Image (cartoon, grey):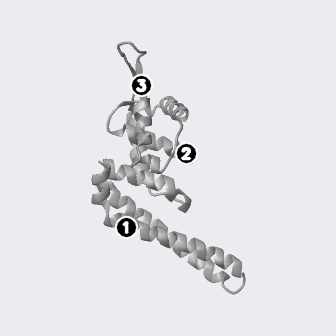
Amino acid sequence: MTRSALTIEYALLGLLYQQPRHGYEIYQELLAEDGLSLVWRLKQSHLYALLAKLEQQNYVTATLEPQDSRPPRKILQLTPAGREAFLSWLRTPVPQGRQMRQEFLAKLYFAHRLEPTTSATLIDKQRDICADWLASLQNQADMLATERPFEWLVYQFRIGQIEAMIHWLDVCEQAPAAVGEHAA
């Protein structure tokens, strides 16, 4: 999983991080109103296709569990490679502002649930990246103020978005205990 366009795959690894599960159990957790459903919507058929892909990539392994009067169900668990891929993803801030809405929120969800100490580090790293984005945008905007007013306005909008992200990261930092307790 070298690309990061569909980070739901990493989130699926995160749902298997604590314990093996079957696909429908993962799907039910994705539907939970106070969890990842706030970030992603995923059809059940797409979930199973992604789980099969993760299995093909050796991030997940499956065993069949017999059931009384029903067909056996597939129990999925992380491989060492899957565990490593998930933890690497979890601990890395997002490189672009547009990834804050889904990918960073998913990382924060798992950081609070699975690795509370990672949460503060992730927030700090993300704030540093946002500060770099902000400085770059401000430098670009400063060069445009008198020459190209519409372009300057566009940069002001983007600057406002980054400032809002930094403010939100401050809020995240102040509330990790409450969020972690709610998610557990």
Q: Nearer the viewer, residue 125 or 159?
A: 159
Sequence order check: which comes first, mark 1 or mark 2? 2
Picture layout, residue 75 above or below residue 171: above
Few, some or many residues within 10 Å of mark 1 (<14, 14–19, 20+): few
Secondary structure state at the residue bearing disc 3:
strand
Q: Dots 3 and 1: beta carbons under 8 Å?
A: no
Residue wearing tag 2: 6
In which quadrant of the rendered view does residue 25 lie? top left
Residue in view at x 44 percent, y 51 percent:
106
Position of residue 88 measured from the top left corner of the image (x, y, whole percent): 41, 48
75 over 163 or under it: above or below:
above
Kindly report the distance in space between the C-alpha atoms of the residues bearing marks 1 and 2.
27 Å
Instruction: Report which residue position mark 1 lands on.
Output: 171
Residue 145, picture quadrant: bottom right
**Which is nearer the N-term, disc 3 or disc 2?**
2
- Residue 98 badge: none
Residue 133: x, y in percent?
A: 53, 69
Q: In the rendered picture of this protein, how many numbered marks are placed on residues? A: 3
Residue that numbered label 3 is attached to: 62
The quadrant where residue 27 appears: top left
Q: Identity of the amino acid at label 2?
A: Leu
Q: Residue furthest right?
A: 147
Q: Which residue is situated farthest in the top direction here?
A: 69
The residue type indicated by label 1 comes to Val
Amino acid type, residue under disc 3 in the picture? Ala
Residue for point 41% across, 66% down: 169
Q: Earlier in the sequence, mark 3 or mark 1?
A: 3
